[in-house]
Amino acid sequence: MNWSQYAIVYDLMADSNPAYQQLLKDFCSYMTGLSIPPDGIILDLGAGTGHFSLLAAQNYPNCKIIHVDQDTKMIARAKEKAHALGVTNIEFVCGDVCSPQLEKGTVQLLLSIHCLYACGSHSQALEQAHLILAPGGNAYFIDPGRYLDIRDWSGYLFKHLVKSRGLLSAVTTFIRGLPVARANRAILRLQKEGVYWTHTTDQFGNALKEAGFKICQLDTCYRGYSDRAICKKTDS
Ligand SMILES: C[S@@+](CC[C@H](N)C(=O)[O-])C[C@H]1O[C@@H](n2cnc3c(N)ncnc32)[C@H](O)[C@@H]1O
C-alpha cells in the first residue's frame, strides 16, 4: 500500500465524504466531555494528514499533541495544515505505531483512527498503546473491520456530491479523486489477502480487552464499515 500516493488526495476524500465528516463531529462531541490536565500528552497513532490530531490540538491548546505516522508525505501535509491554522502544540514523529518511542504511563489521551487494520500487528500496537497510556487515561479507537465495497462507496459519494455541488462538480471531483479509488482497491486486495486486519465489532472489542483496555462504549460507525471504541486504562 502506497500511503504517500494516497496522501496527495486524502483530504479530498475526507472533505467530500459526509461519513468521514460525521466521525470528526462525533470526536468533537467526545472531547467536549473530556478534560485533560494542562500540559497533558495526547497521542495520535497513524495520524495521517492530521484531521484528528489538529482537532485535538485546537481543543486542548495547553496540551502537547504527538502526531505519529510512518509516511513522510502524510506528515508533510499535516504540517502544512498546522502551519496554515497557526497550530503550534503538535510534535510530528515519523515512526511505527507498533513500537512508539514514548515513556510508559505518560499519555492522557490516545487516539488511533483507521490505522490499526493496516499497521502490521494490531495486537503489538495495542499492547504498546496500553503501556504508554497513563493510569486512568482515555483512548479513542476507530478501525475499519469490513471489506471496502468500492462500488457502494463510489455510489454513496457520487450521490452526495451531485446533491451538494451539482453534476459537473461531482464529475470533476471524481476525476481528481481517481487515486483514492486506486488506494481503496489496494486496501481491499490486502484485506482479502489477510494482510490487513478485518474484524467484527465483537472481535475488535476482544482485541482491545486482551490488550488491557476497559471498554466504556463500543459501536459501529462509518456506514457500518468501522468499529469505534471509547476506552479507559484502569488505575491499577
Ligand atoms: C487511512 S489513514 C488514516 C489517517 C488518519 N488517522 C485519519 O483518520 O484521517 C492510515 C494511516 O496509518 C498510517 N500507518 C499505517 N501503518 C502504520 C504503522 N505501522 N506505523 C505508523 N503509521 C502507520 C498510514 O501511513 C496512514 O497515514
Image (cartoon, rainbow, N blue to C red):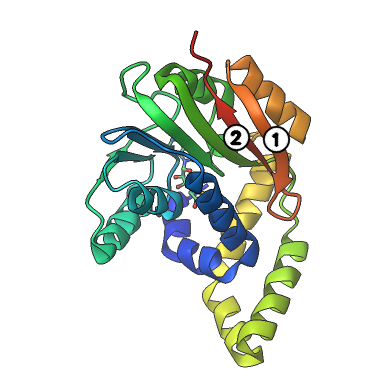
The circle drawn on residue 124 is none
- Which quadrant of the figure has residue 144? top right
Q: Secondary structure at mark 2?
A: strand
The answer to whether the residues at label 1 and label 2 have Cβ atoms under 8 Å apart is yes
Name the residue beneath numbered marker 2: 230
Q: Is residue 95 left or right of residue 197?
A: left
Q: Which residue lies at the image location 32% right of the left edge and 48% below the top edge?
A: 72
Residue placed most toward the observer, 235 or 141: 235
Q: Residue furthest top?
A: 236
- The image shows a total of numbered marks equal to 2
Of the residues shown, which amino acid type is indicated by label 1?
Leu
Q: Residue 102 at x, y = what percent?
A: 31, 23
Relative to 162, say whether 46 is above or below. Answer: above
Residue 2 at x, y percent in the picture: 48, 50
Which of pointers 1 and 2 lies earlier in the amino acid sequence? 1
Q: Which residue is mark 1?
A: 218
The residue located at (54%, 56%) in the rendering is 24
Q: Dot 1, how many residues are within 10 Å of its Cα: few (below 14), some (14-19), or many (20+)? A: some
Amino acid type shown at disc 2: Ile
| Residue pictured at 65% horizontal, 19% vertical | 209
In this rendering, the answer to whether 109 lies above or below 221 is above
How far apart marks 1 and 2 lie (CA) works out to: 7 Å
Q: Residue 4: x, y in percent?
A: 41, 53
**Callout 1 secondary element:** strand
Depth check: give the residue in front, 96 or 138.
138
For this rendering, which residue is in front, 52 or 182? Answer: 52
Q: Is residue 138 left or right of residue 94?
A: right
Task: Please state the horizontal and vertical placement of residue 95, each as a whole percent of the image.
Answer: 34, 34
Residue 182 appears in view: no
Label 2 Cα neighbours within 10 Å, binned few <14 / some 14-19 / many ≥20: some
Note whether 77 is above or below 75 in the view shown: below
